[in-house]
Amino acid sequence: PAKQFVYPELARMAARPGDRRTLAAVLATNPSWRRDFLAAAARQRIAPGDVLALIGEMRRQRPGIDLAPERDLYVQALAQAGDFRRARMLWLEALPAPERARHALLFDGTFRQAHSAPPFGWDYAGTESGRAERSLEGGRPYLDVSYFGGSDVVLAEQVLALEPGRYRLRTRAKSESGDATSGAILWNLTCTGGANLLRLPLVGLREGYRDLEGAFQVPGNCPAQRLKLIGAAGDVAATIEMQLAAVEVLRAN
């Protein structure tokens, strides 16, 4: 479709002051394609300063306009530029005030919310090798996980922006089938630069939920982290079924 060629050109207009005013004037009319364009612009990697200038121009041309979609683009631009902590601070401020403390370190650790604005929410996988999806049991949410083996797969993933220091990752899980004969499911936490911080295999599980936890330390050169729930292949393909009621990050005492 033509829009896949048009949107990148429109996104480039944000970097040029004269063109930016024109773009702002059009977006300020709230066209039907506004959100689709902003989603495409996020993939274009616009400089944060250009997005901020676009927001200012839209506010000048139409005072009172809801700029939440453009603020989401600004947050994504900050993260793409490597300013993860500022990006997550602004992302957190966009949540309802009563929820901010609960999501300060990790978002939606009890799998209650279906959607969140990128880039700091959950990404859930659904592939031939495995899937993770939100479910309810007796009105209580949980993450239903199935891993079919054969190859490693990321089942769920979230970007964090923890400050340097000592932490604990705690999760609550159960598996009626018990430990797998081959392969495993585990939480893996790394710096976005690649350094490994924590590997927590989810083993020793039975019908009732139990807590598992591991300690880790975030170094000073690790401005963002990637938390992944991984299905790790064993010698032979084997299915693992598991339910997770919670995962949380806690500051160590």
Image (tube, rainbow, N blue to C red):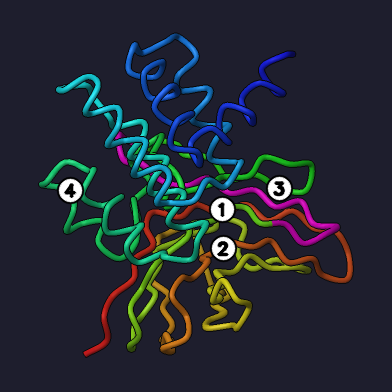
Using the numbered discs, state the Cα–Cα distance from disc 3 to disc 1 in whole angstroms. 10 Å
Q: Which residue is mark 3?
A: 130
> Where residue 126 sits in the image (x, y, percent)?
67, 40
Q: Amino acid at mark 1?
A: Ala
First in residue order: circle 1 vs circle 4: 4
Q: Which residue is mark 1?
A: 156
Front one among 195 and 199: 195
Tell me the SS state at disc 4.
Answer: helix
Relative side of 181 to 209, left or right = right
Tell me the SS state at disc 2.
Answer: strand
Q: Which segment is the magenta one?
A: 138-153
Q: Which residue is mark 2?
A: 228
Using the numbered discs, state the Cα–Cα distance from disc 2 to disc 1 in whole angstroms. 6 Å
For the question of whether residue 87 can be seen, the reply is yes
Front one among 98 and 233: 98
Front one among 130 and 103: 103
Q: Which residue is mark 4?
A: 99
Task: Please determine whether, in this image, residue 87 is positioned above or below residue 7.
Answer: below
Corner quadrant of residue 84: bottom left
Q: Quadrant of the N terminus?
A: top right
Q: Residues within 10 Å of mark 2 (few under 14, many from 20)?
A: many
Residue 144 drawn in magenta: yes
Q: Mark 1 and mark 2 in contact (Cβ < 8 Å)?
A: yes
Q: Residues within 10 Å of mark 1 (few under 14, many from 20)?
A: many
Q: Residue at x 78, y 68 (%)?
A: 182
